Amino acid sequence: MYDWQREGQKGMNNHSWKGEKRKTQREISMKYRHSHREQCRERLKKYRKLNIEKVKIWRKTSLSNMLHKWVGIVPLKTFCEMCGKEIFYNGGNKATSIHFDHKSRKAPIKISPSTWLMSHQRNTKNELIWKSCDFGMLCERCNRHLPTDNREQFVKNAIKYVFGKNLTNV
Ligand SMILES: [Zn+2]
């Protein structure tokens, strides 16, 4: 049997809406959620409003749990491949976190790599998908300035701009 008391201690999953029998997110079936979509949305909105601090903590913990599942495939700490700045896999501070860089549009993961990590379980299949993308690891600044489309031409132009000539062996 499911341990409701223990679930309650976790906070977020124990919804006690007024006038309602206690229900947890898991208890509400997909079918129920489907046919009561509006009500569910309203309840969640109300809950979030009333428990904003709790929700903030929950979001932070669940985010870091999801992210940390991927440690090993993704390093906790590394250096920007372009400027050498120390960057961290923490999902928090944009300025110091690892920005996974799409080297081309051909990578199987089209969405934001960090979002993908957060929304996918770590298993052999997903590890292979991740590895096949060969994402670069950059700091925020370098990632912002390096385009994915027409990247080679951009860099060639940048070289020409900086050195005042084409580098023939590039
Ligand atoms: Zn950098």
Image (spheres, grey):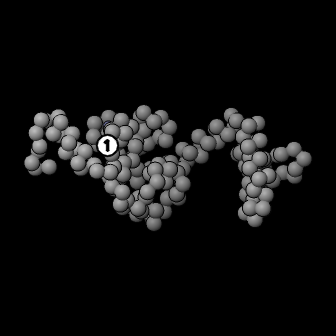
Residue at the right extreme, as displayed: 19
Closest to the observer, 131 or 10: 131
Q: Quadrant of ligand 1?
A: top left
State whether label 1 is within 8 Å of ligand 1: no
Q: Position of residue 14 (x, y in %)?
A: 76, 48
Classify residue 168 as left or right of residue 44.
left
The quadrant of the rendering that contains the N terminus is bottom right
Q: Residues within 10 Å of mark 1 (few under 14, many from 20)?
A: some
Q: Amino acid at mark 1?
A: Leu
Q: Position of residue 20 (x, y in %)?
A: 87, 50
Closest to the observer, 161 or 112: 161
Q: Residue at x 56, y 45 (%)?
A: 63
Check the image and report above or below for 50 versus 105.
above
Classify residue 115 as left or right of residue 6.
left
Q: Is residue 139 visible?
A: no
Determine which residue is flagged by label 1: 146
**Kind of element beneath mark 1:** loop
Q: Residue at x 20, y 42 (%)?
A: 157
Q: Residue at x 33, y 45 (%)?
A: 147
Q: Quadrant of residue 36?
A: bottom right
Classify residue 123 as left or right of residue 87.
right
Classify residue 81 as left or right of residue 87.
left
Q: Position of residue 22 (x, y in %)?
A: 84, 51
